[in-house]
Image: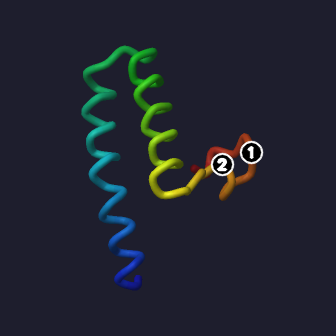
Amino acid sequence: MSTTDEAVVAAAKTPAEDLNEVESASTDEAFTSTLVECTEERIKTIGVDYSDACEAGSDCC
């Protein structure tokens, strides 16, 4: 993995870990809402929409 790839992976770990904590302490509805907010923020911040990278409806992302 290149340095850039490693930086991207490292940057993705923190939000994933935070979401893990939220999921265990939230109702399904609250977690889904948080997940949607995080996804929208990620798209605005880094311009990555995983639905563009994967086939729509796929569970690859």
Q: How is the image coloured?
A: rainbow
Q: Is residue 21 above or below residue 58?
A: above
Of residues 38 and 31, the one drawn nearer to the viewer in this rendering: 38
For label 1, count other residues whose C-alpha is less than 10 Å away and answer few (under 14), some (14-19) or many (20+): few
Secondary structure under the numbered disc 2 in the rendered image: helix
The quadrant where residue 58 appears: top right
**Residue at numbered disc 1:** 56
Question: In the rendered image, which quarter contains the N terminus?
Answer: bottom left
Q: Residue at x 33, y 37 (%)?
A: 19
Say which amino acid is labelled 1.
Ala
**Residue at numbered disc 2:** 51
Secondary structure under the numbered disc 1 in the rendered image: loop
Of residues 51 and 48, the one drawn nearer to the viewer in this rendering: 48
Q: Residue at x 74, y 51 (%)?
A: 55
| Numbered circles on residues, count | 2
The quadrant where residue 21 appears: top left
Q: Position of residue 9 (x, y in %)?
A: 37, 65
CB under 8 Å between discs 2 and 1: yes
Q: Is residue 3 above or below residue 47?
A: below
Q: CA distance from mark 2 to mark 1?
A: 6 Å
Mark 2 vs 1, N-terminal side:
2
Q: Residue at x 25, y 21 (%)?
A: 25
Q: Residue at x 43, y 38 (%)?
A: 38
Say which amino acid is labelled 2.
Ser
For label 2, count other residues whose C-alpha is less than 10 Å away and answer few (under 14), some (14-19) or many (20+): few
Q: Is residue 33 left or right of residue 14?
A: right
Q: Is residue 43 above or below residue 53?
A: above
Q: Position of residue 46 (x, y in %)?
A: 48, 58
The quadrant where residue 26 appears: top left
Any mark on residue 1, and which? none
Q: Is residue 37 above or below residue 27?
A: below
